Amino acid sequence: MFTDADAAALYDLLNPWDGARHPGDAFYDGLVMTAHAVLDVGCGTGSMLRQARERGHRGRLVGLDPDPAALDRARRRTDIEWVAGVAADASWDREFDLATMAGNAFQYFVGDEELSTSLVAIRRALRDGGRFAFDTRNFQVRAWEEWKPSNASEVVDGNGRTLRVSHHVESVVDDVVTFAETTSAHDGTVLRIDRTSLRFLEVSKLGAFLSEAGFEIEAQYGGWQHEPVSDASRSIVTIARRT
Ligand SMILES: C[S@@+](CC[C@H](N)C(=O)[O-])C[C@H]1O[C@@H](n2cnc3c(N)ncnc32)[C@H](O)[C@@H]1O
């Protein structure tokens, strides 16, 4: 048995939030700690907001995610609002200074309609001049080409089990990549397969979606040290402002 709760715990093990070690985490930490009210869209297990509170953030912190098992982990911290749901259904109106989508969560907006309605809802949640910060992998670098079983990683989970996590791309249709993540026991027994589709938007298309939803790009980087965006940038990091 490998439950949804096990999968959420494994996510935290493989992706520990640590601003001292990961420049991407430090980038978001800097924005969050200086904003009074923050909405983290696709918060997952909530590690970014939980750490912000631990480090003394005194304002309003809200995490939104459709995954109940991830939210169960987030809810271990009760001084943060945790909300179940997808971005498109969010109904906050001018309540936040900052919205974030860390860890490439933005790529889960796959269809044009879902992307547009999600952006409109995120914009509505922001106060005038509020900012939306997110990262998304650059289509041109084709990161999915490295998502193959030979690049599997091994990890020892909280119960002392050695687990193997591997990826296999099933299809690439236009800019949408569908892949399977297989979690196996040390002896090769498959415990779980999760299928995900992610969209890899090009810079110009991303800009068009943002502008149509009522955002202007305040800053856009090709990396966490504020490098300019180029064809070789692995990530596109965007700070957009509600106009
Ligand atoms: C890769 S995880 C990132 C989690 C967290 N932001 C982090 O950096 O560790 C992506 C998260 O986006 C959530 N997600 C997927 N579709 C979503 C949607 N339409 N609206 C909001 N969140 C969504 C998933 O449930 C998942 O927890």
Image: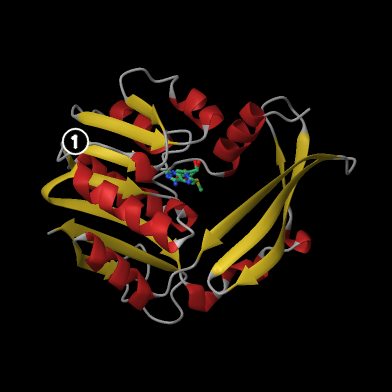
Above or below residue 27? Residue 222 is below
Horizontally, residue 172 falls left or right of residue 108, namely right
Residue found at the very far front of the displayed protein: 113
Residue found at the very far bottom of the displayed protein: 231
The residue under the point 60% across, 65% down is 177
Image spot of residue 123 (x, y percent): 22, 50
Image spot of residue 162 (x, y percent): 78, 37
Horizontally, residue 147 falls left or right of residue 24, namely right
Using the image as rendered, state which of residue 128 and residue 155 is in the foreground: 128
**Can see residue 57?**
no
Residue at disc 1, secondary structure: strand
**Where, by quadrant of the figure, is residue 133 drawn?**
bottom left
**Can see residue 72?**
yes
Horizontally, residue 45 falls left or right of residue 157, namely left
Using the image as rendered, state which of residue 36 and residue 3 is in the foreground: 3
Q: Is mark 1 within 8 Å of ligand 1?
A: no
Q: What is the three-letter code of the residue carrying label 1? A: Ala
Above or below residue 137? Residue 166 is above
Residue found at the very far left of the displayed protein: 128
The residue carrying mark 1 is: 37
Image spot of residue 184 (x, y percent): 80, 42
For the N terminus, the quadrant is top right
Using the image as rendered, state which of residue 216 and residue 34 is in the foreground: 216
For the C terminus, the quadrant is bottom left
Image spot of residue 22 (x, y percent): 43, 51
**Where, by quadrant of the figure, is residue 136 drawn?**
bottom left
Above or below residue 53? Residue 108 is below
Horizontally, residue 64 falls left or right of residue 142, namely left
The residue under the point 61% across, 52% down is 196
